[in-house]
Image: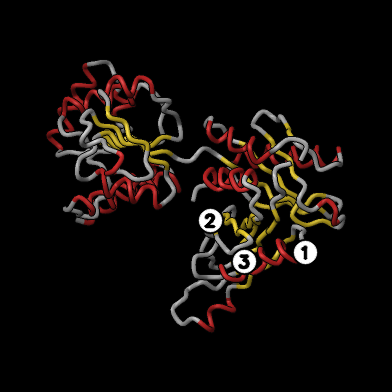
């Protein structure tokens, strides 16, 4: 999804009162699958829009987003170490690190 | 937020304008995390972090990021890490001619992040069913092009069914700035079209901007392979600039 499509989805979800979290790649080092600025929306029911990592690290990002959404309720900066995935999935080529900013989206007031 | 910056960002991108969404992603002052500003080219600022001095420093960093179109985070005293999300209109591809190459071309271009518009004067070819997710225009080429807001983030692919339409499209397109213009065809057909345009007053320097024959020379033959070579060239121009695409062409031609 393009940035524009992501932001349009953010506006749509907020208007609909859907609980969701926006995850943005704000830093990256080493070999990473997506570039700085890549974004993903994670809804409370697990639905996602966009991608920040394809197969690599996406589950970690999703977990961090759901934690921010359902547990802490606060935005935070999370480091995702993709070398963890390297050992468990033989075919993956990712080996870097990403810093993801996850923030719960407030419903439109 | 005092104003809804999300909606504001959507409006700006829809209008084809750039902006930098600056967000405090880490801070010694935890209450500041998640605060953001929207900074426009020219320096206008919307939103606030709640600290006027921090706002000023962020606005300066954001203006620099906008000028360079460079995303990333910056450390701002005292103890704030701010992510500068430079948002620019999506690179848009205009496909002139909705024949057999246009279908895979539109799909590939969308996959790699371009926004795609397809134009043809034949309604059965320029049909939304053939081009899901694209803006499809069934209209006389000249009329449609006269009204399109082409600009520096547009990549134009001219693959119509005949040189008359090729020339029509190019004449309209070449009078405006674009990121890329490519024309399909044999060297003979291309030469004919460009010569015609030269006689109509298009400057030689602008004619030289046209990539012909269109697409990186990967030897593609099927419509999908030709589409792949065209989209590869578009990506190369977007990432590295037109000079790099021309270098690649020469390298392959010299190697053959």
Please tell me which residue is depicted at 32% across the width and 45% down the height of the picture.
Answer: B106
Q: CA distance from mark 2 to mark 1?
A: 22 Å
Q: Which numbered dot is residue A61?
A: 3
Residue B240 in view (yes/no): no
Please say if the residues under marks 3 and 1 sit with CB atoms less than 8 Å apart.
no
Decide: is B28 above or below B175: below
Label placed on residue A49: 2
| SS label for mark 3 | helix
State the residue at coordinates (34%, 45%): B132
**Chain-order first, disc 2 or disc 3:** 2
Q: Do tags 3 and 1 sit on the same chain?
A: yes
Secondary structure at badge 2 equals strand
Can you say which quadrant of the picture contains the C terminus of chain B? bottom left
Judging from the image, mark 3 belongs to the subunit labelled A
For disc 1, the chain is A
Instruction: Provide the residue designation for mark 1.
Output: A72
B108 over A73 or under it: above or below: above
- Distance of label 3 from label 1 (alpha carbons): 15 Å
Q: Residues within 10 Å of mark 1 (few under 14, many from 20)?
A: few
> Residue B188 is drawn in which quadrant?
top left
Q: Is residue B177 left or right of residue A36?
A: left
Q: Tag 2, which chain? A: A
Q: Earlier in the sequence, mark 3 or mark 1?
A: 3
């Amino acid at each position: 999804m393009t940035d524009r499509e992501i932001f349009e989805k953010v506006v749509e979800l907020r208007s609909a009162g859907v609980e969701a979290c926006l995850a943005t790649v704000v830093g990256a080092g080493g070999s990473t699958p997506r570039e700085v600025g890549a974004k993903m929306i994670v809804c409370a029911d697990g639905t996602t829009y966009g991608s920040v990592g394809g197969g690599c690290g996406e589950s970690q990002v999703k977990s961090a987003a759901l934690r921010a959404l359902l547990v802490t309720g606060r935005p935070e900066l999370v480091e995702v170490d993709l070398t963890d995935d390297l050992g468990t999935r033989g075919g993956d080529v990712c080996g870097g690190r990403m810093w993801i900013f996850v923030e719960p989206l407030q419903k439109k007031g | 937020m005092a104003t809804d910056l999300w909606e504001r960002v959507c409006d700006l991108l829809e209008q084809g304008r750039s902006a930098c969404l600056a967000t405090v992603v880490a801070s010694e002052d935890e209450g500041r995390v998640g605060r953001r500003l929207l900074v426009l080219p020219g320096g206008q600022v919307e939103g606030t972090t709640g600290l006027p001095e921090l706002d000023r420093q962020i606005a300066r960093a954001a203006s620099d990021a906008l000028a360079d179109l460079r995303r990333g985070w910056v450390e701002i005293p005292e103890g704030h890490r701010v992510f500068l999300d430079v948002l620019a209109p999506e690179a848009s591809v205009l496909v002139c001619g909705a024949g057999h190459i246009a279908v895979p071309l539109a799909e590939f271009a969308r996959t790699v992040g371009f926004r795609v518009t397809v134009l043809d004067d034949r309604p059965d070819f320029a049909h939304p069913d053939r081009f899901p997710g694209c803006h499809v225009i069934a209209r006389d080429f000249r009329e449609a092009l006269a009204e399109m807001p082409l600009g520096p983030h547009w990549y134009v692919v001219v693959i119509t069914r005949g040189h008359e339409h090729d020339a029509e499209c190019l004449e309209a397109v070449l009078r405006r700035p674009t990121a890329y213009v490519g024309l399909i065809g044999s060297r003979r057909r291309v030469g004919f079209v460009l010569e015609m345009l030269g006689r109509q007053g298009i400057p030689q320097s602008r004619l030289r901007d046209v990539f012909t024959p269109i697409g990186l020379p990967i030897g593609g033959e099927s419509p999908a392979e030709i589409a792949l070579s065209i989209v590869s060239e578009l990506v190369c121009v977007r990432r590295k600039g037109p000079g790099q695409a021309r270098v690649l062409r020469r390298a392959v031609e010299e190697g053959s």
